[in-house]
Image: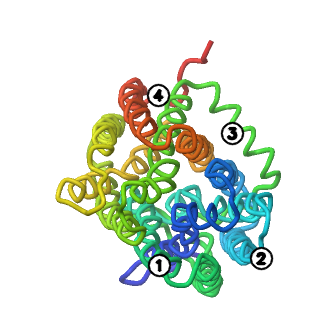
């Protein structure tokens, strides 16, 4: 039976634990851009090889997400997230003893990719859908900002560790960060409001549903149903470009690109961390805006502004941090993952109860886009001696994403079948 809730709803505690969990799991995402040069120098691996390992991680991050959302319906959020954190810690620790590039692909790519993918934005979507009816856009923005907060916390720390002590202690630090979060998840996170006799925040009490069996089959069935609709492909396409222009490009290649222009690694990493500061502000603001304005128009604005900023970036890279670069960092940071709340809102609008799993598949496209650019960015650097062509190509892709966003239909659950 439902009981009267406390003055501060339990949903906010669950959201806080989720926020901290994502920070701990996201610690690894601070590493790849910092370690490209050290791994290249120590082992002689090409930037393309290292970029390929990062691309495996990013692709699995996305492809695991929809299955993780279904597994959370079957086994519960806590069990899935604890297993995911353990995989991240294992991959980070094992990498300390690697001597061959295939081990980098196994530890960074497979283990960490599966772990971080199980704590991807589909995790945030599941928590938000279960625990909140009101303020969903705001909560989505806050939880999305957790990844940026992890970047803010760990990037300067890991950059200092790499610079002073080498890359191995930094990898151990990331593993410990993932393990520290495990007790908080197990003790404080709850799978459903009904577990503690509460209604979701802003909603009516509903009994906890029975575990959904056949998680893999359900995940694939949802994909096949969504793939028959136009909005799915437009959302997947725009989000693939989002991933290409953020995780694949800036997170992976900004630090080595700035270092190519003579900027110290610690300074470049600090700029990336500052992007994380403004990412938190921009994503929470985007969640607030998504509760009030049309999501597809917000997406079009976000992608257009991002594309313009990337076109100017090659002109701003220099040995020292100057005012135009600071302006880019602030501007780009506000836009970094501001796309997530309106994208998730459009998934809810079109796909209802299956929106978390559909968003997981849309996120998979995000990470595939990121993986492609993480790999091709390294190849382009090896081939041309600079990253300029990658910055310009990503700016053009963002312009295409802005146009695609405006084509997404409104208030239609089932769009016309694609020919």
- Mark 3 vs 4, N-terminal side: 3
Nearest-to-viewer mark from 3 and 2: 2
**Real-space Cα distance between discs 3 and 1?**
30 Å
Mark pair 1, 4: CA separation: 33 Å
Q: Are marks 4 and 2 in contact (CB under 8 Å)?
A: no
Q: Is residue 110 visible?
A: yes
- The residue carrying mark 2 is 97
Q: Dividing the picture into quarters, in which one does residue 330 lie?
A: bottom left
Give coordinates of residue 187: x percent, y percent.
Answer: 62, 87
Q: In the image, is 223 to the left or to the right of 146?
A: right
Q: Mark 2 or mark 3, which is nearer the start of the sequence?
A: 2
Left or right: 337 with respect to 124? left
Q: Which of marks 4 and 2 is nearer the N terminus?
A: 2
**Location of residue 96 in the rendering, given as x and y in whole percent from the top left corner:** 72, 77
Quadrant location, the N terminus: bottom right
In the depicted structure, whether residue 20 falls above or below residue 393: below
Instruction: Look at the picture and state if 120 lies above or below 356.
Output: below
Tell me the residue at 55%/84% (across/down): 165
Quarter occupied by the C terminus: top right
Q: Is residue 356 above or below residue 405?
A: below
Q: Distance between the residues labelled 3 and 2?
A: 40 Å
Residue 21 sits in quarter: bottom right
Secondary structure of the residue carrying numbered label 2: helix
Q: Between marks 3 and 4, how big is the CA–CA gap?
A: 17 Å
Query: Residue 397: x and y, percent?
Result: 43, 31
Which type of secondary structure does the marked residue at label 1 adopt?
A: helix
Q: Can residue 189 be seen in this view?
A: no
Classify mark 3: helix, strand or loop.
helix
Foreground label between 3 and 1: 3
Residue 69: x and y in percent read 66, 56
Q: Which residue is denoted by mark 4 in the rendering?
A: 412
């Amino acid at each position: 039976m439902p009981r009267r809730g406390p003055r501060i709803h339990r949903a906010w505690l669950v959201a806080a634990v989720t926020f901290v969990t994502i920070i701990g799991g996201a610690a690894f995402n601070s590493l790849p851009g910092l370690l490209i040069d050290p791994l290249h120098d120590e082992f002689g691996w090409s930037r393309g090889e290292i970029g390929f390992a990062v691309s495996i991680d990013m692709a699995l991050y996305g492809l695991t997400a929809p299955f993780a959302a279904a597994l959370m319906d079957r086994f519960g959020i806590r069990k899935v997230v604890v297993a995911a954190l353990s995989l991240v810690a294992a991959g980070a620790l094992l990498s300390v003893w690697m001597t061959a590039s295939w081990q980098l692909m196994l530890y960074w790519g497979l283990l960490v990719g599966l772990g971080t993918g199980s704590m991807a934005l589909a995790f945030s979507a599941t928590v938000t859908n279960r625990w909140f009816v009101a303020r969903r856009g705001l909560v989505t923005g806050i939880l999305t900002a957790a990844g940026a907060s992890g970047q803010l916390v760990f990037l300067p720390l890991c950059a200092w560790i790499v610079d002073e002590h080498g890359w191995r202690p930094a990898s151990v630090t990331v593993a410990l960060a993932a393990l520290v979060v495990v007790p908080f998840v197990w003790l404080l996170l709850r799978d459903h409001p009904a577990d503690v006799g509460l209604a979701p925040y802003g909603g009516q009490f509903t009994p906890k549903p029975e575990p959904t069996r056949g998680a893999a089959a359900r995940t694939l069935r949802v994909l096949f149903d969504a793939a028959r609709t136009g909005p799915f492909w437009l959302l997947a396409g725009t989000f693939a470009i989002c991933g290409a222009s953020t995780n694949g490009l800036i997170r992976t290649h900004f630090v080595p690109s700035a270092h190519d222009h003579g900027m110290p690694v610690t300074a470049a990493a600090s700029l990336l961390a500052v992007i994380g500061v403004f990412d938190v502000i921009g994503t929470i603001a985007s969640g607030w805006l998504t509760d009030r304005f049309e999501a597809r128009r917000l997406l079009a604005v976000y992608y257009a502004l991002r594309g313009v900023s990337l076109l100017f970036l090659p002109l701003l890279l220099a040995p020292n941090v100057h005012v135009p670069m600071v302006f880019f960092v602030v501007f780009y940071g506000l836009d970094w993952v501001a796309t997530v709340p309106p994208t998730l809102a459009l998934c809810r609008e079109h796909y209802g109860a299956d929106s978390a799993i559909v968003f997981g598949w849309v996120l998979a496209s995000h990470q595939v886009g990121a993986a492609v650019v993480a790999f091709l960015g390294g190849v382009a650097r090896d081939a041309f001696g600079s990253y300029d062509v990658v910055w310009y190509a990503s700016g053009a892709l963002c312009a295409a994403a802005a146009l695609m966003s405006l084509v997404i239909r409104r208030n239609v659950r089932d769009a016309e079948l694609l020919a």
